[in-house]
Amino acid sequence: MAGDLFAVALMICVHAGSPAEVCALTVIKGLSSASACAQAAGKLGDIVYIASAPDAQIAIKATCGSYDPADPRIP
């Protein structure tokens, strides 16, 4: 739809697959194109991985999608 923007949802799990697994979801909205979204997702994943503890098992999943900023259901 015309006027749509893109957002990247980034799920980050530390100690992935273990009983100590802890996950966090963050969403970054306002990207202008699918390519900008994909680029942001890749860079965010790299930053999280580089900043992690050397012995932490980290799983990162980034998903891009579009949304209509005029939709009142989207905060």
Image: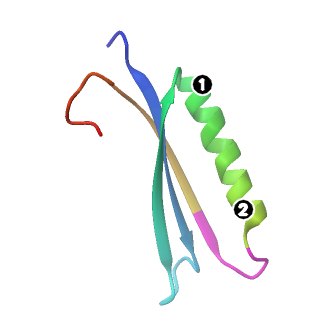
Q: Amino acid at mark 1?
A: Ser
Looking at marks 1 and 2 on the same chain, the residue that comes earlier in the sequence is marked by 1
Q: Which mark is residue 21?
A: none
Which range is magenta? 53-59
- Residue at 58% across / 80% down in the picture? 15
Q: Position of residue 8 (x, y in %)?
A: 50, 40
- Residue at 27% across / 21% down in the picture? 70
Q: Which residue is mark 1?
A: 35
* Dominant SS in magenta: loop
Q: Position of residue 6 (x, y in %)?
A: 46, 28
In space, the residues marked 1 and 2 are separated at their CA atoms by 21 Å
Q: Which residue is mark 2?
A: 49
Q: Is residue 19 above or below residue 74?
A: below
User: Would residue 23 appear left or right of 3 to someone viewing this image?
Assistant: right
- Residue at the outermost top position: 2
Image colouring: rainbow
- Residue at 69% across / 79% down in the picture? 56
- Residue at 50% across / 81% down in the picture? 21
